[in-house]
Structures are given as structure tokens and as C-alpha cells.
Amino acid sequence: MASWPSPSTDTSSPDTVAAVDLGSNSFHMIVARAADGDLQVIDRLKEMVRLGEGLTDAKQLLPAMVDRALACLERFGQRLREMPPDSVRAVGTNTLRQVDPAFGFLEQAEQALGHAINVIAGREEARLIYLGVANGLAVGAGRRLVVDIGGGSTELIVGEGVTPRLRESLQMGCVSMSHEGFPDGRLSADHMDQAELAGALEIRPIREQFRHADWRQVVGSSGTIRAIARVVEARGWSPDGISAGALDRLRDTLIGFGNCGAIELKGLSEQRKPVFAGGVAVLRALFTTLGIEHMQISQEALREGLIYEMMGRIRHEDVRQRTVGKLCQRFGVDEEYADRIKTTAIAFYGQLAQSWGLTSSDHLNMLGWASRLHEIGLMIGHSHYQKHGAYLLRNADLSGFTRQEQNILAALVLGHRRKFPSQEFLALPTLVRDNSRRLCIILRLAVLLHRGRSPTTKPCPMLNLDGERLRLTFPEGWLSQHPQTRLELEQETERLAPADIKLEYR
């Protein structure tokens, strides 16, 4: 569930930040601070929760799994609860992408952690993984392929430096493959063949694209890959990372055990044994299908990517700004007009922010982004273009944005004209519902004042709250000289009334 934080009285350094990764296999927490341009890890916790094991066909979680996950988050929360909300970012990945929001787990998880939790899309997860891995590698290593095997999904990214060029999220992981490929923990050559074939079929649609992406180096992240590397190194099969030959020998060794419970390998923890064979099957499918001969190992992954991104935002290097700029270019936005909308919207925001409790920097960001993007649907068609724009923002791959942020942005764009979409806002998480609705009202009024698209400077009316009423006050005599604006305000008053929004103007 997304939530915009309130101001905190915490006086700790803004350069101290924390990231929480709620994966399908493990939950991770990392606390770090910036020190001389580098990250200094202060605290790190990991628990093998295996959330993916508790996902039912009805897209809910088994009660025992809910209890295990909440207990873990409460332990994390003891460390994070005193940190300012803006300095903590928690994300959910594959399993939480699948859990029915109506099940209510996210609300319980947020309460246990003491901070907002956002679910991120697979390709956004891939971008953040690459950011974490790339920042931990030597500069100038050329184009690389990064592989991360999670509990329920596998992310593949090709990039150069700290910039991802190609990214994909596949629906297979160590937990899901172990359950589907090795029922009751049985290990056999046939089971392994079938699991690797299932992996190859999942990779097949993007196989050629990634095989011919001209990478020179392969880097593996995630606990699954690091566990495999520890095992093959302990056996003396591959002293530096994972080789294709070492992976073949590991496969044969696993089959020899006959059952996951019987696995005894130096370097492999008891907790990882139930899902180890599934992880090996996924990795071997990747090696075989993509032609990988050797893989280096990274200690960084998604949580480090979150930390680096948060550090960037503290320094005003927000990838979301770049994403919005690219969308404007791609969909031919009239940016001069959009900037006029944004200027008026921000002026209204300044007049209402305290009264309406719009106190987070992300409130202002979201309003500015919606102002710039409110017309992107025109590229598809003029009729109902607000609906086209909302669809694009809800479903596009927007780097830097969480799924919830995209839903909020889509609701603002959908609601910027015509009928006020009350149901759209009711569908948003409770913690952001009212503030998103208020931002939409501000955007609507800014758009209305510029409907004629004239570059001529408009008056700056006062917008304030008078009890439960919004009052818009223009310079004396201005409305009588602009009857079209008066008529539009009259229509807007009627459109807002069914949503219990009372607008007055004079």
C-alpha cells in the first residue's frame, strides 16, 4: 500500500536510510549511511520467510505464513520505527504482486513494520537490482548481463555502467520451481530434466533478445545464486564464481541424494535446502538457454539498489523525473502549455497545502507530474483522452514508480476533466485516498483556468477553504469580463457536487 509520509521530528541525518525487501523467499533489511561518497552499512538483517509457499490459488496467504511474515516485520520494525518515513523504503516483489489487495495483508504488514510498503512491478524490480549490482562493481567493465533468481521470479538485465539497457522479469524462482518441479521434495534425473525444460520454456520468448545483447560479463545476485556459488567453491569445482561445468556436476550430485531433505552440502544452510534444487534448475536453464559459460557473484542486490536510489533522491537525482520527461517526448506533450498548468497547480497547492495536510514532497511531485502528463492520451484519440492517459499510466513500464504511485498518477489524470471519478479514488489505499482526491481537485481547477490554451498570463485567483467549501476568488471584475470561464466554473461546480465537493467562486 502506498502512503505519503507526514513530517517527522526526528533529527537524525538524512543521509541515513533503510531499505526493506519483502521477497518471495526471504525478507531483507539494510540500514546504511553515505560516507565519503560510498555506502557504509550500519545494520543488516535477513530472515527466510518463504512467503511464496503460502500463496493459495485464491491469491491469499495461508494463516501460518501471515503470522511468520508479520513476526519478521515486527522485528524489522523495532529497528526502523524511529527513523523518519522519508528515509525508509520498503517494497514487495513477486508474491505480493499476486496477493489479492482485498485480502488485507499489506495493511497488516505496514502496521507491523511501522512504515509504508509499496509493491513494485517485475521490470522495476529488475532496474533496482541492476542499480544495486552495478554500483558494487568496478567502473568500465563493459556491457554485462545481471541475473537475479528470487523466490517467485527471475530478473534479467543487460546494462552498461549504472544504466540498464534491457530488462525482463520471468515468472519462475527457487520457491515456485521447487514446488512445481520437485513434488514432495523428490529428486531424480527426470524431475530435474522437466524442471529445466519448464525454465527453458519460460526463457524462450526473450531468449534471442538476450543472447544477442552483446554482453561480455555475467553477474549473479540474490541468495540463491550466492548459495550455489558457496557450494561449488566448497567442492573445489569453481573457485571464482559459477562455471557451466560446476553447475553440471552440482546437478548430478543433487540427483544422487534422491530427496531435498537428504541434501548434505558444505556451504548450504538448512533453511535453503527445500528450495535449493529449484534454484539450481532455474540457473542451469539460464546457463543452457542463454549460452552462459561463467558467472561472477555480486553481494549487492535489490535492497542495495533501493538504498542507492534513495541516496539519489536525497541529492535530487530522481529517476522518476527522467521517466516523466521521456513520456512527454514520446507522446508529443505540448510542454509549454503543460508548464502553465503546472505553475497554476503549484500556486493553488501552496494556498491549500497546510489546510489540506498536503505535507510531503511527494504530494507536490505527484501534482507536478500529473500536470505535465495530463494530455498524453491525446496521442491515442481526443475523445475521452483522459481515459487513454490513465490507462497508459496505470499499465506502462515507468522506471522509478511503484505500482501504487502509477495508480495514483492514473487517477489524477483520469479525474482532471469531465465527471469526477469518485470510485477511482475509493479504489486507492486508505492512506493516500483523501490526499490524492485533493490533488485531483487542484489539478482540475488549474486545467480549467487554462482551457483556452492562451499563452496570455492568467490572473492568480485565491483558493482557500471556508469550512467545508472551496472558495475561488478572482480579481474584482475579472469574471464578468470572461463569461466563458464563469460558465465553465458553473459546470465544474455541478460536476463536483455529486462527489460532495462544494465549490464557490466570485
Image (cartoon, helix red, strand yellow):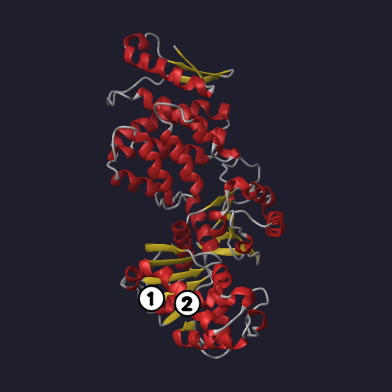
* Residue 187 horizontal/vertical position (percent): 59, 81
Q: Secondary structure at mark 2?
A: helix
Q: Is residue 145 visible?
A: yes
Q: Which residue shows up at 40% across the image and 17% down it?
A: 491
Tell me if residue 396 comes above or below residue 167 in the rendering. Answer: above
Residue 369 got which mark? none
Q: Measure the C-alpha gap from mark 2 to mark 1.
A: 13 Å
210 sits to left or right of 196: left
Residue 351 in percent (x, y) is at: 50, 25
Residue drawn at x 58%, y 63% is: 24
Q: Please identify the quadrant where the C terminus is shown.
A: top left
Q: Residue at x 49, y 82 (%)?
A: 242
- Asked which quadrant contains residue 61, the reply is bottom right
Residue designated by label 2: 196
* x then y, percent, for residue 460: 40, 21
For label 1, the SS is helix
Q: Is residue 422 left or right of residue 336?
A: right
- Is the residue under label 1 in contact with that under label 2 (CB below 8 Å)? no
Where, by quadrant of the figure, is residue 338 drawn? top left
Expressed as whole percent of the image width and height from the top left, the position of residue 160 reads: 36, 67
Q: Nearer the viewer, residue 400 or 353?
A: 400
Q: Is residue 148 above or below residue 83?
A: below
Depth check, mark 2 against mark 1: the one in front is 2
Q: Is residue 411 left or right of residue 333?
A: right
Amino acid type of the residue tagged 2 in the rendering: Glu
Q: Amino acid at mark 1?
A: Leu
Which label sits on residue 290?
A: 1
- Residue 36 shows in this picture: no
**Horizontally, is 398 left or right of 358 in the view?**
left
